[in-house]
Image (cartoon, grey):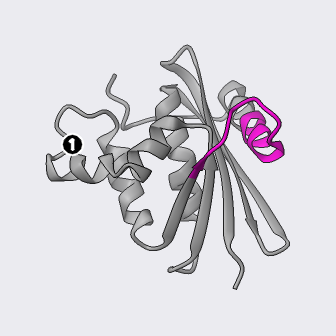
Amino acid sequence: MSELIIYTDGSARGNPGNGGYGAVLHYGGAIKEISQGFKHTTNNRMELMAVIEALKLLKRENLDITIYTDSSYVVNSVEKKWVFGWVKKGFEGKKNPDLWKQFLIEYKKHKIKFVWVKGHADNKWNNRCDVLATQAADGGNLLEDVGYTG
């Protein structure tokens, strides 16, 4: 069984402003790209949304997944187990609880490891995700980020 590799990135113009996410999924020899733009959102929301939407695509459970992202917010929240403490406190005083709750539903279905990569550097797939995210943010098919409350 192959490991699933996912690269993700998020972008926001103005933060808050128009935003977008991009993700590239690698499984075996197959590669799939996804992206979407949103009105009035933040970079952190788009970083997290990229992960969620990539995981929602998966039709099987219990996969070994490595997710590469340049978002310290996402990596630290999961790998340092902060998000699990936030759950116990009802996300009191934390941003993006709607997305974190969606993330945790998907997270529990798999064995996921996050790896931080330097953004805008020499990682081909992180750079591709950046292009997808910024094109989505600048595109004309922007959705409402209904969970954004900032």
Q: Which residues are magenta?
A: 115-132
Image-based side of 24 in relation to 98, left or right: right
Q: Residue furthest top?
A: 14
Task: Look at the image and say whether residue 125 sits in the magenta stretch.
Answer: yes
Tell me the amino acid under the disc marked 1: Phe
- The one of 39 and 22 positioned closer to us in this rendering: 22
Q: Position of residue 75 (x, y in %)?
A: 49, 45
Q: Position of residue 4 (x, y in %)?
A: 67, 69
Residue 21, image quadrant: top right
Image-based side of 71 in relation to 27, left or right: left
121 to 86, vertically: above or below = above
Residue at the (44%, 64%) spot, across then down: 106
Regarding residue 58, the answer to whether it shows in the image is no
Quadrant where the C terminus is found in the figure: top left
Q: Residue furthest bottom?
A: 1
Estimate how packed mark 1 is, as few (under 14), some (14 to 19) or many (20 or more) residues with alpha carbons within 10 Å: some
Regarding residue 18, the answer to whether it shows in the image is yes
111 to 56, vertically: above or below = below
Q: Which residue is mark 1?
A: 91
Q: Position of residue 98 (x, y in %)?
A: 32, 45
Q: Position of residue 74 (x, y in %)?
A: 47, 43
Q: Secondary structure at mark 1?
A: loop
